[in-house]
Image: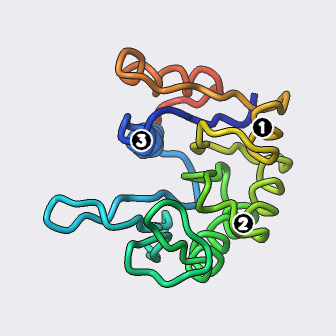
Amino acid sequence: MKNILLTGRPGIGKTSIIKEVIDILKINAGGFYTREIREEGIRKGFEIITLNGKRGILAHVDCRSPYRVSKYGVNIKDLEEVAAPAIEEALRNKECIIIDEIGRMELHSPKFCSLVKKALDSEKRVLGTIQARHNEFLDSIRERKDTKVIEVTFENRKRIVKEIKEILKWREP
């Protein structure tokens, strides 16, 4: 297995696990992760943060967009101008590609979907998250022979970093 994708309910800790893997194992990684945007304790949207520090808005309640997921307008521009270039750069220069996440919002961008497929098909390792929902694109990723999907639960989330390390045969520095 060269690709590991975490799945599980929102807020279970998938992104935290990915960040811990990167920090503990000092992986030469590129790509991006997402983070909730909260105002006065209320979730208002999602931010894209690349591993080299660039930021963009993935979706926000105030974003005017023809692409909507629930109450959020999806910001295709930042998805394609912040997240997509981070994947492209990782494909060229990094050992591992971080894609957090492959889900409903991101699926509105054919460019993003194409890059996900390119990353999974590459010789590079991919560590990311995938939405539990079913659709043709997400299901085709889950069915890949070179990809392991791990469901994160409250019971297993503390041991998943070790499991990822063993699957990908990474060693701590």
User: Whole-percent x and y of residue 71?
Assistant: 43, 65
What residue is pinned by disc 3? 10
In this rendering, which labeled residue sits more in front, label 2 or label 3?
Answer: 3
Q: Check the image and report above or below for 46 versus 133.
A: below
Disc 2 and disc 1: Cα gap in Å?
A: 16 Å
The residue under label 3 is which amino acid type? Pro
Residue at figure coordinates x 42%, y 17% from the top left: 156
Verify CB contact (< 8 Å) between mark 2 and mark 1: no
User: Whole-percent x and y of residue 51?
Assistant: 49, 63
User: Whole-percent x and y of residue 61?
Assistant: 38, 73
Direction from residue 24 to residue 65 in the image, left or right: right
Disc sitting over residue 112 in the figure: 2
Judged from the image, the secondary structure of the residue bearing numbered disc 2 is: helix
Verify CB contact (< 8 Å) between mark 2 and mark 3: no
The residue under label 1 is which amino acid type? Asp
Verify CB contact (< 8 Å) between mark 1 and mark 3: no
Disc sitting over residue 139 in the figure: 1
| Quarter of the figure with residue 43 | bottom left
The residue under label 2 is which amino acid type? Phe
User: Which comes before the other along the chain, label 1 or label 3?
Assistant: 3
Label 3: few (<14), some (14–19) or many (≥20) C-alpha neighbours in 10 Å:
few
Instruction: Name the image quarter holding the N terminus.
Output: top right
Residue at figure coordinates x 46%, y 38% from the top left: 21
Q: How many marks?
A: 3
Direction from residue 144 to residue 65 in the image, left or right: left
> Is residue 98 at all visible to an observer of this figure?
no
> Is residue 103 at all visible to an observer of this figure?
yes
